[in-house]
Image (spheres, rainbow, N blue to C red):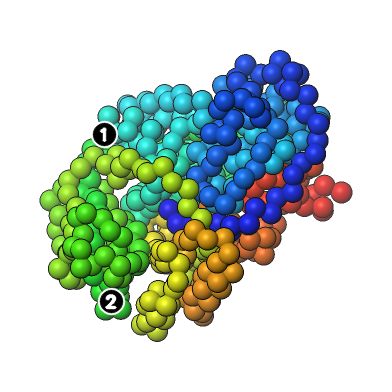
């Protein structure tokens, strides 16, 4: 995961008076309010730079609870936030003065081993789902961070370690249960409410609260995977990209060019020098996987090599409890030539943040074989996803790091069509959201929004406003 967060929390507090006793009567789940012992922990999200104070956080237990909270917000005019794993880069998992639907207690998981499917409740995280399905040698691809909620990553698309072999997360989404703005609990799939099913596959949380997902499972009894650390030069980065593009589709990789952190397994003389920190997953035969990894190891003498046969869940190790603040951008590009790579190195060496990072995800394979208009994720034909980030501690430095990110982003995207991955967008405004949903995708999403959420109740997100033409 990379960061697209802005340090300034620009959301305006909601002043609506919320009658808490009535809210408690309306739901079976726990209602947490200011003054409760767990309030501060419950309102804290993954990313730093946000200090929003909701009037109520409702830890819902089922779809009926969700419907009742939606009705309550609709009737009172309260701002409504929806929180799964709490990883919204823009902080949209928590409202300032409104109501939060917290899905974290909804952990149900029904695995059909023979049918290779699973019904998963929206409060599960990627690591919880992956460990449970992995006990049967099965997997669905999510992202690169285990604590991310399966709901948020799925609704935005899902670009992770199985993207070239099995496609995006949404390519394995078979059905869903969703609660809409009018309180209906709908079962949707390709045949039932097909427009809505199309929209939630990439369109984010604009259309309702998804409470359950039905996923396809793949046989992934073991992978060859892990982290590979290489010295970073323009030559090694070009060689890494070439190796990744030439690799079989069973191999997906995400790598970052960054200063080496003081990790104990990295040579001390490398700390602070630019390195390639790569995550590799080969989903297939172990011997074939070992052969597929060799071209990466041959690029340069590895600084550390942790790639080995393991369960797929091993790609989600325990995470530290930290809340990063970063200036960053996400983009899709189709070329990373010598000029762009040279500029990247110049900028990385000149950056003044505590950590400057360029992360590159190699796309293609199964993801690219799905028609562009098959889902609301509209970037099937792009070659790379690139994320640029500057992590820092001092808020007074925000403008400096934003300028660095903006400059490097412009250089890396030069000559390519603009594009953005909605799950990595921050508080960037409608123009950037339009880059996530170009052309006809935007128009179709607005029409579906007008049908299912004409008053824009679900607006605390990368918002798609209802089409006025569809809702005069």
In this rendering, would 400 be left or right of 144? right
Question: In x, y percent, where is residue 280?
Answer: 27, 55
* Residue furthest bottom in the image: 339
Q: Secondary structure at mark 1?
A: loop
Q: Quadrant of residue 397?
A: bottom right
Residue at image position (72%, 36%) is 98
Tell me if residue 156 can be seen.
no
Residue at image position (51%, 30%) is 104
Q: Secondary structure at mark 2?
A: loop
Q: Relative to 90, is 44 above or below?
A: above
Residue at image position (29%, 55%) is 279
How far apart marks 2 and 1 lie (CA) works out to 38 Å
Q: Nearer the viewer, residue 36 or 18?
A: 36
Q: Nearer the viewer, residue 448 or 69?
A: 69
Task: Count residues near mark 2 (Cα–Cα under 10 Å), then give few for <14, some for 14-19, many for 20+.
Answer: some
Question: In x, y percent, where is residue 114?
Answer: 32, 26
Q: Which residue is mark 1?
A: 137
Q: Relative to 306, is 17 above or below?
A: above
Instruction: Tell me how many marks there are.
Output: 2
Tell me if residue 277 can be seen.
yes
Question: Which numbered tag is attached to residue 233?
Answer: 2
Q: Relative to 175, is 469 above or below?
A: below
In this rendering, would 212 be left or right of 186? left
């Amino acid at each position: 995961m990379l960061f697209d967060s802005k340090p300034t929390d620009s959301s305006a507090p909601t002043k609506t008076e919320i009658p808490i006793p009535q809210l408690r009567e309306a739901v079976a789940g726990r209602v947490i309010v200011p003054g409760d012992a767990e309030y501060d922990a419950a309102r804290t999200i993954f990313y730093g730079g946000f200090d929003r104070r909701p009037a109520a956080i409702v830890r819902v237990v089922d779809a009926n609870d969700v419907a009742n909270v939606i009705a309550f917000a609709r009737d009172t005019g309260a701002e409504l936030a929806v929180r799964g794993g709490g990883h919204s880069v823009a902080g949209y998992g928590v409202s300032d003065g409104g109501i939060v639907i917290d899905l974290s207690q909804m952990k149900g998981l029904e695995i059909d081993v023979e049918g290779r499917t699973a019904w998963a409740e929206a409060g599960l995280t990627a690591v919880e789902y992956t460990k449970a399905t992995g006990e049967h040698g099965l997997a669905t691809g999510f992202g690169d961070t285990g604590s991310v909620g399966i709901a948020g990553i799925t609704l935005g698309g899902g670009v992770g370690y199985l993207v070239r072999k099995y496609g995006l997360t949404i390519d394995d989404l078979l059905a869903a249960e969703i609660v809409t703005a009018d309180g209906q609990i709908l079962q949707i799939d390709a045949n039932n409410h097909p427009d809505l099913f199309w929209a939630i596959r990439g369109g984010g949380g604009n259309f309702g609260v998804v409470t359950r997902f039905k996923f396809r499972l793949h046989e992934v009894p073991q992978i060859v995977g892990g982290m590979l650390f290489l010295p970073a030069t323009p030559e090694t980065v070009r060689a890494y990209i070439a190796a990744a593009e030439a690799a079989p589709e069973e191999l997906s990789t995400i790598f970052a060019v960054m200063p080496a952190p003081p990790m104990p397994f990295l040579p001390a003389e490398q700390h602070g020098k630019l390195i390639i920190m790569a995550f590799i997953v080969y989903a297939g035969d172990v011997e074939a996987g070992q052969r597929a990894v060799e071209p990466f190891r041959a690029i340069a003498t590895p600084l550390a090599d942790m790639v080995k046969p393991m369960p797929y869940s091993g790609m989600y190790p325990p995470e530290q409890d930290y809340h990063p603040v970063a200036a960053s951008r996400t983009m899709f590009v189709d070329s990373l030539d010598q000029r762009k790579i040279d500029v990247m190195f110049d900028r990385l060496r000149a950056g003044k943040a505590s950590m400057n990072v360029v992360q590159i995800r190699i796309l293609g394979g199964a993801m690219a074989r799905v028609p562009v208009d098959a889902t609301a994720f509209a970037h099937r034909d792009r070659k790379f996803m690139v994320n640029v980030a500057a992590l820092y501690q001092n808020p007074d430095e925000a403008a400096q790091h934003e300028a660095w990110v903006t400059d490097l982003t412009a250089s890396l995207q030069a000559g390519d069509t603009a594009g953005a991955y909605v799950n990595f967008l921050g508080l960037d405004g409608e123009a950037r959201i339009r880059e996530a949903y170009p052309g006809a995708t935007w128009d179709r999403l607005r029409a579906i929004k007008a049908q299912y959420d004409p008053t824009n109740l679900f607006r605390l997100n990368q918002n798609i406003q209802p089409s006025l033409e569809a809702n005069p």
